[in-house]
Image: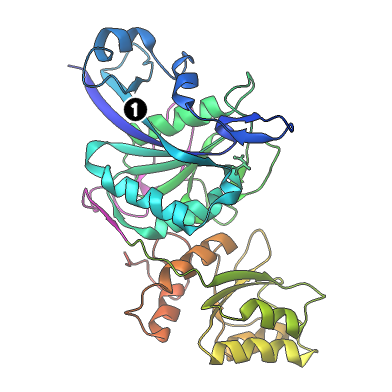
Amino acid sequence: MTQIKRVLVIYTGGTFGMLKNEKGVLVPQKNIEKVIRRLPQLHDEEYYRAHLANSEKKEYLALPDGKDTELKILYKIYEYEELKDSSDFTLDDWIKQARDIKKYYHDYDGFVVLHGTDTTAYGASVLSFMLETVGKTVVLTGAQVPIFQPRSDGNNNFLCALLIAATQLIPEVTVFFGAKLFRGTRVKKVSNTRIYAFDTPNYPPILEARTTLDVDPKMLIHPPGSVPDECRIHDRLSRKVYTLKVNPTITAEVIRSVFQGMEGVVLETYGNGNIPIKRKEIYQEIERAVKNNVLVVNVTQCINGTVQGKAIYETGLLLVECGVVPAFDMTAEAAWAKLCYVLSKTELSYQQKVELMKTNIRGELYNPNHVVVNGK
Ligand code: ASP
C-alpha cells in the first residue's frame, strides 16, 4: 500500500518567487502555487487529478515519484498574506513562523520554509533557538535565481528540501541549498551570486545530496528516537540586541551609541578575539557596559575559527578580564539569535545567561570545556 507523507510549505517571500517590477527590481509575487503546479518536476498533475482533485486533499500538490517507490509525498503551500524580501524581516516574522510550525505540527510529517536568502542565517538560527523541542524535520530553503526563470536553482533546492522533510527524521532546524543540508545555527550566506550561497565554515554539512538523500544519524544533534514527537516553542525574544564590528576607526563614542539601551551586544573582534588596547577609552567603554549588565559576546570576524575563554594575545586579555563572554566558534548570526533568545529568559540571572551563552544548546558552538547538553 502506498504510504503518504505530508509536508507543510510556508512561503514567506524571497527571490524564489520574485519577478521584476516596473522599476526593474525584484519583488515577491503572490500565488506561487499556481506557478509550481505547472512544473512537472515539482507537481504530478496526473496523480493529482486521479487521487486528490475531487477529495478533501484538493489543496495539496503531489511530488512526482520515481515509479519505484511506495511513498507518495503530498505538500500544501501556506502562502503568507504579506510576502517579503527577507531583508525586511523583523523578529516578529520568525515568531510567526515558529508559531505556525507549532500550530500545524501534528498535521504534517515535516516542514519547509521558503525564505529569502539575505537573512536565512539569522532566521535559521533564531528558529533553532525558539523551537525548544521539535520532533520533525524543518528545512529552510530558497533560490538565487527566481523559479520563473529556466535556470532557477529554486527547483532543485525546493525539491530536495521537500524530499528531506518528508523522508528524513532530522529533528532540528536546517537549511538546504545547492547540494547540501546545513545545521541552522551554523550557516552563513557566503555568496550573492553563486548557486552555492551558503556554507557552515566551522561545521561539516549534515547531509550532502548524492545519488541518495540519506542522513548519517551521527550528524544529528539528538540521537535518533531521543526527541519526543512534539513541538514546544519559546516565542519571546529580546529586541535589545545588536552586532558591532570592530574597525580601526572605532571610537568610544561609536561604542557608547551602539551599546546605549542594549541588553546584549555581539562584538565582532579581530582574529582570536582582539581589540585595539592602546586607546584605553575603547576598552573602558566596553568594561562600563559589562558592569551595567550588558551581555557582551566576543565573536571572531574570521570566517573560520574560534574565540576561546582564555586570551591568546594581550589585545584580547582585557575583554576576558572584564567579563565579555567568548562565543567560541559561533557565527555572528547565531550569537545574535542566541542573545535574543537567552536575554528573553527573565527567570534567569545575569550569570545564568552568561553560562547559557557558553553552553552548546542547538549545535551552535563547540566549547572544549563543556559537554553537549539538551539545554532549554
Ligand atoms: N533579497 C532576497 C531576500 O532575502 C534575496 C534572496 O532571497 O535570495 O528575500
The answer to whether 270 is drawn above or below residue 25 in the figure is below
Q: Which residue is mark 1?
A: 75
User: Ligand 1 near label 1 (Cβ, under 8 Å)?
Assistant: no
Instruction: Please tell me whether residue 60 belongs to the stretch shown in magenta.
Output: no
Q: Is residue 163 left or right of residue 289?
A: left
Give me the residue at 41% from left, 79% from top.
Answer: 353
The residue nearer to you, when weighing 133 against 61, is 61
Q: Quadrant of ligand 1?
A: top right
Residue 63 shows in this picture:
yes
Looking at the rendering, the stretch of residues picked out in magenta corresponds to 206-233
The residue nearer to you, when weighing 89 against 340, is 89
The answer to whether 187 is drawn above or below residue 80 in the figure is below
Q: Residues within 10 Å of mark 1 (few under 14, many from 20)?
A: many
Give me the residue at 33% from left, 46% from top.
Answer: 100
Q: Is residue 269 left or right of residue 92?
A: right
Q: Give residue 261's position: percent from left, percent from top.
A: 56, 80
Q: Is residue 317 left or right of residue 230?
A: right
Q: Give residue 60's position: percent from left, percent from top.
A: 32, 23
Q: Is residue 108 left or right of residue 33?
A: left
Q: Give residue 127's position: percent from left, percent from top.
A: 42, 54
The answer to whether 303 is drawn above or below residue 32 in the figure is below
The residue nearer to you, when weighing 42 against 306, is 42
Give me the residue at 49% from left, 15% from top.
Answer: 39
Q: Quadrant of the C terminus?
A: bottom left
The answer to whether 191 is drawn above or below residue 319 in the figure is above
